[in-house]
Image (spheres, rainbow, N blue to C red):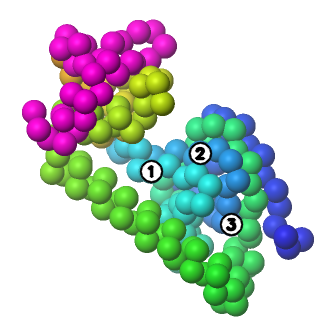
Amino acid sequence: MSHRVRRLKIPAGQIVFRPGDACPGLVELQSGTIRVSLTAANGRELVLYRVGPGDMCLQTFACLTQGQSYSAEGVAETDLTGVLVPPDEFSDRMDTEAGFRHDVLAAVARRFAEYERLVEEVALTGFETRLAKCLLRLADQNGRVTASHQSLAHETASGRAVVSRHMAELARLGIVAQHRGGIDIIKPKELTRIAAGER
């Protein structure tokens, strides 16, 4: 590892970058997840994507290649460990290391495809389908979703009241069970059908 690269250790909940911040370099995560979100003028928040080990943050890529500042917020969703590659080293490696350049561009392509799916879902998919997809995506292996209605609103580009109304209907149908600690998916097959737009 270059002497210019420094190790990172960031606790869960800490802001990694804010709108208007200059980019300190490329964060290469070894563990943990960064949640990247955009807040509109009306205060509504939309989760754009998450960055984990091997992923690329499009915000950071734009900052490093175009000299832009951040326009979204990145928050450590879990404890993070990794390294920070400073901008000059990032540029040097993009110019001289074919393997590094390939990995970066492949990660950007994957992220861009996810971005396209997000735009398509928000623009063309009904809310019930978006919510079902979100619940399935956030569920752990036991079908437990640890998220508040406000968090689900951020994930689905909607309002808390809309989420609460639809969650109440899913609970009434016995598809999910809500409790103080989160949400249990009771009928994953039915939720999967809703996510596929079959209901």
Q: Is residue 166 left or right of residue 66?
A: left
Residue 54 seen in render: yes
In the image as oriented, which residue stretches furthest toward the front?
189
Residue 159 seen in render: no
Q: Which residue is mark 1?
A: 49
Q: Is residue 116 left or right of residue 39?
A: left
| Mark toward the viewer: 3 or 2 | 2
Q: In the rendered view of the protein, which quadrant contains the C terminus? A: top left
Q: Which residue is mark 2?
A: 33
Q: CA distance from mark 3 to mark 2?
A: 17 Å
Amino acid type at mark 1 = Tyr
Circle on res. 99: none
Q: Are marks 3 and 2 in contact (CB under 8 Å)?
A: no
Q: Position of residue 42 (x, y in %)?
A: 32, 38
The local secondary structure at tag 2 comes to loop
Q: Nearer the N terminus, badge 1 or badge 3?
A: 3
Amino acid type at mark 3 = Gly
Q: Nearer the N terminus, badge 3 or badge 2?
A: 3
Q: Which residue is painted at 85% across and 70% down in the image?
A: 1
**Label 1: few (<14), some (14–19) or many (≥20) C-alpha neighbours in 10 Å:** some
Span highlighted in magenta in the image = 170-199
The local secondary structure at tag 1 comes to strand
